[in-house]
């Protein structure tokens, strides 16, 4: 059973960089048919996809966040990470990491982390 | 950018059938999936590739996708099905979520 666990600071100051790491257990991070994604959800609102990375390091980002986001992967540690620069209060949300199954026109998230609340405040 | 539109809320009586729609341009040409999210919990995949149910998801959950609309159907709705439901698709290397629908069982 694949498990994902987010970790990182729960409080970030405005204009600083939000950094989170997702650790994968119970399975390999390397299979080619999966991507590893970050998704966020402000309180009381819907889900917003941030971006994803393959085990080989290929990335895709949400166009609305692309200029501020970097996602990286460390297969030896079975971890992938998110950096979101120049944060504001609008970036306050629960951040989820998730495994995404991909294929021809196929995309779905079959495993999710429990989520971690990140608050942007001085 | 691609958008998926869901009704903000749907109400259903226990034992009846609930239908939640997700609309997007030519959505039927792509695969859609659905997630259930209860308060304070992570989303759970209930339908993928339009019609498939993951292991452990009850048979009362079913899906369809044609034209511009994907539909999640819950037959014999139970009180424990009360939750937020999100559709999701993939377009031009970008993942897109619908805005979510709050299903109320009353």
Image: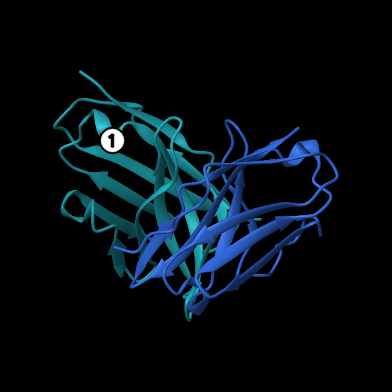
Quadrant location of residue B79? top right
Question: Would residue B102 be found to the left or right of residue B99 on screen?
Answer: right
Q: Nearer the viewer, residue B31 or B10?
A: B10
In this rendering, the answer to whether B8 lies above or below B95 is: above
Q: Among the chains, which one is cyan?
A: A
In this rendering, the answer to whether B14 lies above or below A107 is: above
Residue drawn at x 57%, y 54% as measured from the top left: A111
Give the farthest residue toward the top: A122
Note whether residue A90 is visible.
yes
Q: Nearer the viewer, residue A91 or B86?
A: B86
Note whether residue A75 is visible.
no
Quadrant location of residue B97? bottom left
Question: Would residue A78 be found to the left or right of residue A90 on screen?
Answer: right
Q: Nearer the viewer, residue A60 or B26?
A: B26
Residue placed under numbered mark 1 in the picture? A91
Quadrant location of residue A14? top left
Locate residue A100, reporting x and y percent.
49, 63
Locate residue B64, reporting x and y percent.
65, 69
Question: Would residue B62 be found to the left or right of residue A98 on screen?
Answer: right
Residue drawn at x 70%, y 38% as measured from the top left: B82
Which part of the image, by quadrant, shows the C terminus of chain B? top right
Question: Would residue B30 be found to the left or right of residue A13 on screen?
Answer: right
Q: Secondary structure at mark 1?
A: helix
Locate residue B23, reporting x and y percent.
49, 62
Tell which subunit mark 1 falls on.
Answer: A
Residue drawn at x 30%, y 66% as measured from the top left: A59
Q: Chain B drawn in what color?
A: blue
């Amino acid at each position: 059973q694949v498990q994902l666990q987010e970790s990182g600071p729960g409080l970030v100051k405005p204009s600083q960089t939000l950094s989170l790491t997702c650790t994968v257990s119970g399975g390999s991070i390397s299979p080619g048919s999966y991507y590893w994604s970050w998704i966020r959800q402000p309180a009381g609102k819907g889900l917003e996809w941030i971006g994803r990375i393959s085990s080989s390091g290929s990335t895709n980002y949400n166009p609305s966040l692309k200029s501020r986001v970097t996602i990286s992967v460390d297969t030896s540690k079975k971890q992938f990470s998110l950096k979101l620069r120049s944060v504001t209060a609008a970036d306050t949300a629960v951040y989820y990491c998730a495994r995404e199954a991909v294929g021809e026109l196929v995309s779905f998230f079959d495993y999710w982390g429990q989520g971690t609340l990140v608050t942007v405040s001085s | 950018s691609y958008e998926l539109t869901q009704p903000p809320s749907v109400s259903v009586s226990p034992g009846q059938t609930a239908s939640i729609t997700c609309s997007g341009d030519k959505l039927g040409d792509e695969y859609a999936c659905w997630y259930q999210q209860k308060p304070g919990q992570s989303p759970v995949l209930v339908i993928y590739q339009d019609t498939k149910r993951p292991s452990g998801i009850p048979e009362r959950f079913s899906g369809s996708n044609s034209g511009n609309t994907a539909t999640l159907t819950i037959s014999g709705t139970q009180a424990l099905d009360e939750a937020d439901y999100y559709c999701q698709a993939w377009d031009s290397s970008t993942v897109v979520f619908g805005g979510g629908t709050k299903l109320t069982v009353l």
